[in-house]
Amino acid sequence: MNFRPAIIVHGGAGRGSGAQQRDRLAGCLAAARTGWTAVRQGCSSLDAVEEAVAVLEDDPLFNAGTGSSLNAAGEVEMDAALMRDTLEAGAVAAVSGISNPIRLARKVLDDGRHVMLAGQGARDFARRAGIEPVPGDTLITQAQRKRWNAGHGTVGCVALDARGRLAAGTSTGGTLGKLPGRVGDSPLIGCGTYADAVGAASCTGQGEAIIKVLLAKTAVDLLAAGLTPATAAKRAVELLERQTGAEAGLILVDRYGAVGFAHNAEEMPVCVLTPEGQTATAS
Ligand code: ASP
């Protein structure tokens, strides 16, 4: 099989000022480079995706980890998931006080007993897994307190490594002002995050709509039907729009290392790195 490694990162579908757009694109590029360095050093795509997403969780410009949107109670509750082409998956839902939910999702995946842990049980598991909780307030930025970021900036990454292994990861603070306990698409396997032997996908946008059309799995199934990643991504977003009228976007990589992305929002920062070079676009 002829393939080459690739990594693609998104910084969330939505709208923002020109300056925000530029800064988020720079953040995506930094994250993609971190993941790409891991791939080039021979790490697995799962490690690369985890590292790239963690970079974005630590960047307060994005709605994930530090900088997460606040819920209706003024608190941060985050969702994240990781999946690899062996169908091993780990996810956490509605967790608070965890700086890097993607690292907790990885612990769930590695532990292997369950696919998803939520709420307090996830926090208890984190402690046992060596991830110390942080005070909830430390994840709240001034911008989120003032609601400047308006819920935009979920993050995701998909990659194919040098051994031809696929992985996908997504992390989010969810939608602004959501009810406490609300879980979006990001941690739900097949909805916001999916990987199998054909492809890997990470989604962003209105979670309630993404869940209903299983957007990530739909996009990978379109790859399996023979579409290119670019066409599969476009068709999946069209299908979502037709069936729900909602806004969303997704990134996709296939088992050959071809990438695609599409969205029907105002913007979605995306950065791609392959042996041929890098592409970054914010439109
Ligand atoms: N999909 C995320 C959610 O609904 C939000 C987003 O991507 O902006 O939780």
Image (cartoon, rainbow, N blue to C red):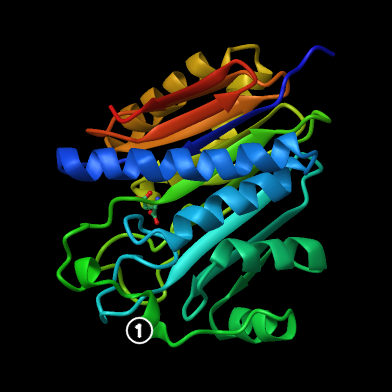
Quarter-of-image position of residue 247: top left
94 versus 169 height, above or below = below
Q: Nearer the viewer, residue 200 or 98?
A: 98
Q: Where residue 235 sits: x, y (%)?
A: 45, 20
Q: Nearer the viewer, residue 27 or 111?
A: 27
259 versus 136 height, above or below = above
In the figure, is residue 55 to the left or right of 254? Answer: left
Q: Residue at x 37, y 23 (%)?
A: 238
Q: Residue at x 55, y 84 (%)?
A: 133
| Quadrant for the C terminus in the image | top left
Quarter-of-image position of residue 71: bottom left
Q: Nearer the viewer, residue 277 or 176?
A: 277
| Quadrant for the N terminus in the image | top right
Q: Where residue 34 sits: x, y (%)?
A: 58, 45
| Residue that numbered label 1 is attached to | 137
Q: Where residue 255 sits: x, y (%)?
A: 73, 23
